[in-house]
Image (cartoon, rainbow, N blue to C red):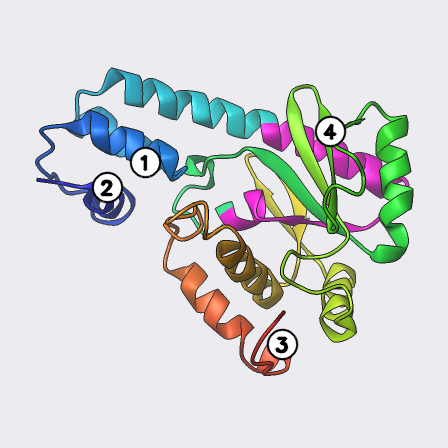
Amino acid sequence: MADMFDILRVSLFTGEDVPVTEWKPIFEEMKQQTVAALPGEWLSSHIDAPSWSLFCMSSQAQWIRVLHAQDALLQLLEANDIPCVILKGAAAAMAYPRPTLRTMGDVDFLVKRSDFEKAAALLEENGYVLTHEKDFVSHHYGYAKNHISFELHRRIPLVAEMDEMWMSRFEEGIDAREWHETEGYRFPTLPVTLNGLVLMLLSSYYQSAFKIRPWVAADHRLDDVCAHAFGKNVGGASAVT
């Protein structure tokens, strides 16, 4: 009988039919792993699962809402000369066969340390509401606006603040950011190798909560990017702490 991994394989890559007799336990597990929206297009012609199909449609609607909120945020930052890059979210969705299949929750973005407090003040002046005390976590502030959550990052999780080499490397990545477009919305990311490295680090960061993160289930191109990120383009470093 098919399991979660069979559903991901056929829906993302092969398109073939697989026998699914009990889809509800698979659906519930995939929701827990935040990958339940990935089989959306495949489902309609292979499984009679109306609640799962509805979930997929709702997920895609949320994706567009998050993209719209992300675009408004980027316009605000750009208008005030605060360069940033998107972390995970749309930056991970680029590796999917269809970016809109990725479950989107919040908007994570990284700014330079010198711009961090300026960016925080700008958000608060423009209706972004702080969702926790500023000393709650060391690497970001959390905000909410129009029912969308935002995380303003000063550094990447798992990169120690005293590690100047890596902090500088990511700030250089903001200077060398690359712009992408999906569904008519443009957004900046770190250069491809650094972006792959960030996804790998975040996968490790969230490993205790999730066996499978959305980017792990993405197209195999992401594996190549992550592997290359540890090579010559990031200085051949063996570890990030």
What residue is shown with label 1?
30
Q: How far apart, in angstroms, are the residues tagged by discs 4 and 2? A: 34 Å
Seen from the viewer's position, the closer of residues 215 and 83 is 215
Q: Which residues are magenta?
A: 66-92
Seen from the viewer's position, the closer of residues 226 and 221 is 226
Q: Which mark is residue 131?
A: 4
What residue is shown with label 2?
4
Q: Whole-percent x and y of residue 93?
A: 49, 45
Residue at x-position 66% and y-position 43%: 108
Residue at x-position 90% and y-position 56%: 114
Near mark 4 (Cα within 10 A), the count class, few <14, some 14-19 or many ≥20, is few
Q: How many marks?
A: 4
Residue at x-position 38% and y-position 46%: 97
What residue is shown with label 3?
234
Q: Whole-percent x and y of residue 73?
A: 75, 34
Answer yes or no: is residue 184 visible.
no
Q: How far apart, in angstroms, are the residues tagged by discs 4 and 3? A: 34 Å
Q: How far apart, in angstroms, are the residues tagged by discs 3 and 1? A: 34 Å
**Dot 2 and dot 1 residues touching (CB under 8 Å):** yes
Answer yes or no: is residue 54 visible.
yes
